Image (cartoon, helix red, strand yellow):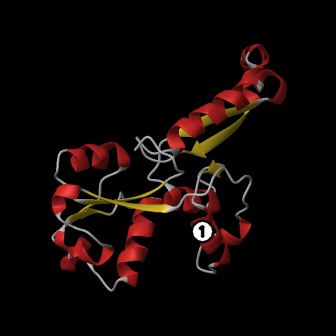
Amino acid sequence: HAETWHSKHADFHDKLVQLGAGPEGGSFGPIGNTLCDTINQERVNTLVRCVAIRSAGSVFNIYAVANGSIQLGFGQEDLVGEAFLKKDTRGGSGLRTVALMHKSPIGIMVRKASGITNLSEIRKGVVNKGNRGSGIYANATAVLKAMDLEDKDLAGVTFMPPVEFEKAFCEGRVDVIFNALAHPSQL
């Protein structure tokens, strides 16, 4: 019975590619969905099935690829390079860049109503560092560290992903948001 069922359902021999596509509302999600849709159009010929999965973001994706939990993942170029060079990144030396989609400058946006007029004044506002495991969080942490600022030095800190921090920013619950995105951006 198993052989008959197996021969009728040979598509279960497809190669599954799980693509870490970042958090809801981030730029990696739509790109991941489009890439997987394109790959899946050739599934009959290639026997490769691609599934874009939501993840925490760049840092999570890098470590998940390095340890074999997923096969592909989007990650900021600098963070991929850093993980590749680190000896403590399990499997980091096995990482490879497959394609560079776009440069992602760090954007630091401040609500005009906050009264913050320069970077040194961000301590006066509620700062969203992004969700842990994301490139946004890694960038925010690096910038704040370079400024010799810790979370306790800020008026407030949140750790929201893009789908949440955009709304919080517009509603005035967050004064400063970090992001890494191609310009121009809808955000």
SS state under label 1:
helix
Q: For this rendering, which residue is in front, 73 or 149?
A: 149
- Residue occupying image coordinates x 35% and y 58%: 130
Q: How many marks?
A: 1
- Residue occupying image coordinates x 29% and y 78%: 120
Residue 110: percent from left, percent from top: 28, 60
**Residue 62 shows in this picture:** yes
Q: Quadrant of the N terminus?
A: top right
**Residue 91 shows in this picture:** no
Residue 79: percent from left, percent from top: 57, 67
Crowding at mark 1 (Cα within 10 Å: few <14, some 14-19, many 20+): few
Above or below — where is 170 with respect to 12? below
Residue 76: quadrant of the picture: bottom right
- Residue occupying image coordinates x 38% and y 73%: 141
Q: On the image, numbered disc 1 is attached to which residue?
A: 78
Report whether 35 appears left or right of 168.
right
Q: For this rendering, which residue is in front, 4 or 159?
A: 159
Q: For this rendering, which residue is in front, 73 or 67?
A: 73
